[in-house]
Amino acid sequence: MSHEAFRRSDQLRGTRISDEMLRALPKTDLLFHLDGSLRIGTFMELATAVGMDVPASARATQARYFPVDRASCHEHFTGFFDHTTAVMQSHDALKRTAREAVEDAYVCGVWYLEVRFCPLRHQAAGLSLDDTVAAVLSGLEEARQATGVRSGVIITGLRTIGPEQSLRLAELAVRWQGRGVVAFDLAGTERDYPAKYHRQAFYHIMNHNLGSTIHAGEGFGPESIHQALHYCGANRIGHGTRLGEDPDLLQWVNDRRVPLELCLSSNVVTGVVPTAADHPLRHYMDMGLRVTLNTDNTLFARTDQFRELRLAVDTFDLSLLEVETLLLNGFKSSFLTQQVKSVLTSEVAARFSELRDMNGLDELEIA
């Protein structure tokens, strides 16, 4: 981010940046799984309605269905999604969870949210693929009217399903292109399930000028990132935590400004990194990569957009200028049209300055 002039508050950093300031700063969340981000109360209510055995308290429900330990959370929470998708099989459930996702993000200062989900996992009660997309978009639109938060849908394929199914999902994404769907994604277990097996789906996406992102470099090494970029033409990389193991590829990613969708809490809980301090976010920022900060799964990782930013600021002693740069990267990396992004980034930069003035941050002593 560029400034016309140096401001004293540029160097305000770490714990000296207040919770109120961090919450108010405009944010994006570009890696956000709808079926990993339900409110625990909503999950309990919907689960009870479909006959699941639900403990009386939220804490007990989380401990039973979504325990935070490495054994349960490995391979990107694979088992947890079985529980949440089981309660998201109707139009009303999908609409509700989408609406609530935006409402919760709004409270955290999010201005733009990209919601991803795999429609194939929401057909047990008879919904068509198109029905699931329509339901989610309905919830997002209802929330936009109430909060003003913009959003888009990313259709997600899974590495563990057949390539022909991924192609079906790619075709679905293209059908809804321009009507709320902004991109196509590939998620799921990386080891033994290469992205290149699904390249026909990505060829379809590329041939229809739709954006794409792929989870890579989380559960497997930089070879996975290489495939995502060079076999499938991904425009963004989900996680990319192990990119630094291949300096040449890292330089390639940096030179071409390929955005990385980083998720601190999720990577800690799933064991990708031992602690938040071991995450390469600071290294990537120092190298000049275009990194964005995201939640991944708010329910599973016990986080939200504000907590994730607070964790990053405190762990890496980020300055306010670095925080603003990180957040602006999110808007620049979104799958919004360039025309919309240009206007929105200008509004965001103006809001950054306004918040500094409102809070008198240039008057504070900077250690």
Image (cartoon, rainbow, N blue to C red):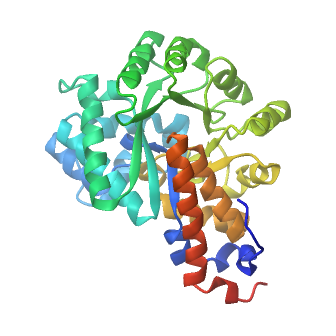
Whether residue 355 is visible here, answered yes or no, is: yes
Instruction: Name the residue located 59 percent from the left edge and 20 percent from the top edge.
Output: 195
Which residue is painted at 25% across and 42% down in the image? 138
Q: Position of residue 320 (x, y in %)?
A: 68, 70
Task: Residue 293: tell me if it is visible.
Answer: no
x then y, percent, for residue 330 = 58, 50
Q: Quadrant of the C terminus?
A: bottom right
Q: Which residue is drawn at 74% across and 77% down?
A: 7
Above or below — where is 345 with respect to 121? below
Figure check: 172 above or below 51: above
Where is 320 relative to 245, above or below? below
Task: Quadrant for residue 328, please give it.
Answer: bottom right
| 281 to the left or right of 338 | right
Quarter placement of the N terminus: bottom right
Residue at the far right: name it. 248
**Looking at this view, is 20 or 152 the one in front?**
152
The answer to which image quadrant residue 222 occupies is top right
Residue drawn 52% across and 44% down? 339
- Tally the numbered discs: 0
Q: Is residue 364 left or right of residue 179?
A: right
Residue 197 screen position, x and y as percent: 57, 12
* Front residue of 9 and 92: 9
